[in-house]
């Protein structure tokens, strides 16, 4: 696979000047699909931390960048929705989505860099009878309890993956809409029916598919979004 792609063919979720440079970094395959993944080398340039590929490599080689508590060793490493990024000495960011579906990186307190919300995409039972939860960022977590359901979310501690909180896909909890017409909307779940869900947006109710709802807390988001 090519290590670069043409700028005009880059995902629409990237905020780049497509006609300035012909080629741009391609993220390696990983936890996030290409449409929702930005290479860390490109992010460093967008933040003004580096101007050239050589400078981005030096920052990476100096072990100055970590994602979800682990040091990044490749400028092609892809970061995506809900990832926590730390850049020495004091920059801490979380990847989220704006209302046009573009990847957005917001400043977060250092105390939140060891926390992340992941959605349960699937669950299976191991031979020893434990429940294995397959999470939205590619993680697999073993759980003693069987109360977790597909579509629920977990607040986990990084990098240990210890489960801190469990948020059900249920009325009253807060959800972030990750796709569709209302992408980027954060609101309380008002109603769930079959494969559809209704969330509050200001004083209105917005409708979307249940699969687009990413639960992020109870009365409010559990982390800064």
Image (tube, rainbow, N blue to C red):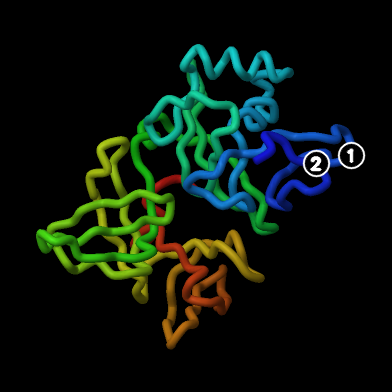
Callout 2 touching callout 1 (CB < 8 Å): yes
Task: For mark 2, give the secondary structure.
Answer: helix
Place of residue 15 in the rendered image (x, y in percent of width and height, measured from the top left): 73, 43
Write down the quadrant of residue 206 in the picture.
Answer: bottom right
Q: Which residue is mark 1?
A: 19
Q: Residues within 10 Å of mark 2 (few under 14, many from 20)?
A: some
Q: Which residue is mark 2?
A: 7
Place of residue 16 in the rendered image (x, y in percent of width and height, measured from the top left): 77, 40
Write down the quadrant of residue 55 in the picture.
Answer: top right
- Residue at 59 percent across and 12 percent down: it is 58
**Extreme residue in the front direction:** 1
Q: Is residue 151 above or below residue 221?
A: below
Task: For mark 1, give the secondary structure.
Answer: loop
Place of residue 74 in the rendered image (x, y in percent of width and height, measured from the top left): 54, 26
Query: Counting residues from the N terminus, which is met first, the one under dot 2 or under dot 1?
Result: 2
Place of residue 96 in the rendered image (x, y in percent of width and height, measured from the top left): 55, 48
On the rendered structure, is 143 left or right of 99? left
């Amino acid at each position: 696979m090519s290590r670069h792609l043409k700028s005009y063919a880059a995902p629409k979720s990237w905020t780049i000047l497509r006609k300035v440079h012909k080629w741009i970094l391609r993220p390696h395959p990983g936890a996030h699909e290409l449409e929702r993944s930005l290479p860390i080398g490109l992010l460093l340039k967008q933040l003004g931390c580096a101007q050239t590929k050589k400078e981005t490599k030096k920052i990476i080689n100096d072990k100055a960048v970590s994602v979800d508590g682990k040091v990044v060793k490749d400028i092609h490493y892809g970061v995506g929705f809900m990832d926590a990024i730390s850049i020495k000495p004091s920059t801490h960011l979380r990847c989220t989505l704006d209302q046009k579906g573009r990847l957005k990186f917001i400043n977060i307190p250092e105390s939140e860099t060891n926390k992340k919300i992941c959605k349960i995409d699937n669950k299976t039972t191991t031979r020893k009878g434990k429940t294995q939860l397959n999470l939205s960022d590619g993680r697999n977590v073993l759980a003693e309890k069987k109360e977790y359901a597909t579509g629920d979310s977990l607040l986990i501690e990084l990098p240990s993956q210890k489960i801190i909180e469990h948020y059900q896909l249920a009325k009253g909890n807060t959800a972030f809409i990750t796709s569709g017409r209302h992408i980027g909307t954060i609101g309380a779940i008002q109603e769930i029916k079959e494969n559809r869900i209704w969330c509050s947006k200001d004083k209105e109710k917005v409708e979307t598919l249940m699969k687009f709802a990413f639960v992020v807390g109870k009365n409010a988001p559990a982390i800064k979004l």
